[in-house]
């Protein structure tokens, strides 16, 4: 039985190893979100699928959003690269790659299984007749974040929702507008005004956030470009935006926003998101039918905050949820004590190791000297014997 299981395991590993996996990313590798998603996929496939059999493509959809000429060139490139090199499974990350495969996937890769992740507004009807597609929708938690903001800032009077009007941002805005209507009709929330900003240049946005009054907060959705076509970089422009803002900025994209001046929010982890999608892909490669892997329509959103921003805006840390993860939090006395003890233990261990090495060295030297002294005694005795023998020979020769 053990031998059968072992042989079966080896055959499965060989099947995985020879499989070709195409990872189609919506954006670019310098975009922290895509980078973490990719890392999650690669780590999940590591030691199972041969590295040279993992093909990674980047569509660069944020910088070339709604560009039909670029889209056609991308179609031509992918068709040329993979016309004679079909993947056994395709993993897509984020909206651009997902919708690209919905439109062109059957032309490029008929019947090849597709596992998607990172789709913010998922519509099951779009793939009702596509039996080879499953995955994990990223979803959003706009409402959950609004309630969280209300909890952290009880005196809030207004929340501004920032979005973009490029194609990938439109479904998010539609969801936000629906929530806005429900919010204003609910007596529990209607005291806080919801505004949606989606038409601005970056210069105008900086100016507008500088003028926001107290008792206001910002919830940021996805912004790809401003209304002048300027690319919005989370690495470059978000720190400028948060520095100019006199009110806290919340968001859902942890890897992109924390550390750049955002306060935090209910956030999704791209690394875990990618790893979970890759795990589904491995099940399919292992023989599980796609139909047996139901689509997961929302990722996990958990509270993450930057302690420095909580302090900056005077938000009581006791108000954050108990399961929150804190960035830049100062160490408590317990942590400091453990760090101090760990430091002393480390020094003691190093000292003990030095003493042990010194004792071993001394013993080796004593042992070597003992051997040397014994050798010297043997050498002297042998020399004496040789002298006596020579003297005997000399005496007998006379």
Image (spheres, rainbow, N blue to C red):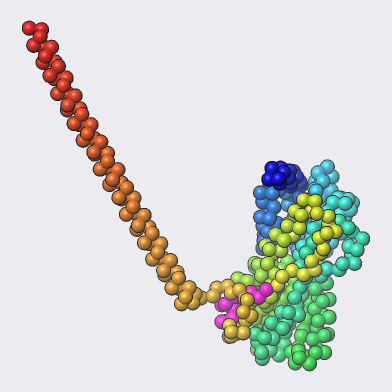
Does residue 153 sit above or below 36 in this rendering?
Answer: below
Q: In which quarter of the image is residue 117?
A: bottom right
On the question of residue 137 being in view, the answer is: yes
Q: What stretch is highlighted in magenta?
A: 302-311
Closer-to-camera residue (182/342) = 342
Q: Is residue 175 left or right of residue 253?
A: right
Question: Within the magenta stretch, is there residue 309?
Answer: yes
Q: Residue 281 in the image: x percent, y percent?
A: 76, 55
Does residue 384 sit above or below 46 in this rendering?
Answer: above
Does residue 21 sit above or below 221 in this rendering?
Answer: above
Residue at image point 68% right, 83% down: 149
Q: Quadrant of residue 166?
A: bottom right
| Residue located farthest toward the right when viewing the structure as drawn | 129
Q: In this view, does 108 lie to the left or right of 223?
A: right
On the question of residue 57 being in view, the answer is: no
Residue at image point 67% right, 62% down: 271
């Amino acid at each position: 039985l053990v031998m059968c299981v072992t042989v079966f395991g080896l055959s499965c590993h060989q099947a995985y190893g020879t499989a070709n996996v195409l990872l189609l990313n919506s954006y670019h590798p310098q975009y922290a979100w895509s980078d973490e998603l990719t890392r999650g996929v690669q780590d999940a496939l590591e030691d199972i699928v041969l590295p040279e059999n993992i093909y990674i493509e980047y569509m660069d959809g944020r910088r070339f959003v709604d560009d039909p000429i670029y889209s056609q060139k991308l179609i031509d490139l992918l068709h040329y690269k993979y016309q004679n090199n079909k993947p056994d499974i395709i993993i897509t990350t984020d909206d651009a790659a997902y919708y690209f495969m919905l439109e062109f996937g059957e032309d490029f890769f008929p019947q090849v299984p597709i596992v998607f992740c990172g789709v913010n507004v998922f519509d099951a009807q779009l793939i009702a007749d596509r039996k080879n597609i499953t995955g994990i929708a990223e979803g959003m938690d706009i409402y959950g974040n609004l309630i969280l903001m209300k909890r952290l800032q009880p005196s809030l009077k207004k929340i501004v929702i920032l979005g973009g009007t490029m194609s990938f941002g439109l479904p998010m805005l539609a969801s936000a507008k629906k929530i806005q209507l429900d919010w204003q009709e609910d007596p529990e929330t209607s005291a806080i005004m919801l505004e949606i900003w989606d038409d601005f240049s970056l210069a105008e946005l900086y100016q507008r956030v500088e003028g926001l009054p107290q008792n206001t907060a910002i919830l940021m959705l996805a912004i790809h470009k401003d209304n002048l076509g300027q690319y919005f970089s989370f690495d470059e422009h978000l720190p400028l935006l948060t520095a100019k803002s006199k009110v806290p900025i919340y968001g859902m994209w942890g890897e992109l926003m924390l550390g750049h001046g955002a306060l935090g929010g209910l956030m999704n982890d791209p690394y875990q998101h990618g790893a979970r999608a890759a795990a589904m892909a491995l099940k399919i490669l292992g023989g599980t039918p796609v139909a047996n892997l139901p689509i997961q329509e929302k990722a996990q959103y958990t509270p993450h905050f930057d302690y420095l921003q909580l302090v900056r805006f005077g938000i009581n840390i006791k108000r954050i949820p108990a399961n929150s993860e804190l960035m830049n939090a100062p160490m408590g006395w317990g942590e400091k004590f453990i760090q101090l003890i760990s430091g002393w233990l480390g020094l003691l261990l190093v000292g003990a190791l030095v003493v042990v090495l010194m004792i071993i060295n001394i013993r080796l030297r004593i042992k070597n000297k003992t051997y040397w002294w014994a050798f010297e005694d043997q050498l002297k005795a042998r020399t004496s014997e040789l002298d006596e023998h020579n003297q005997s020979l000399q005496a007998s020769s006379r």
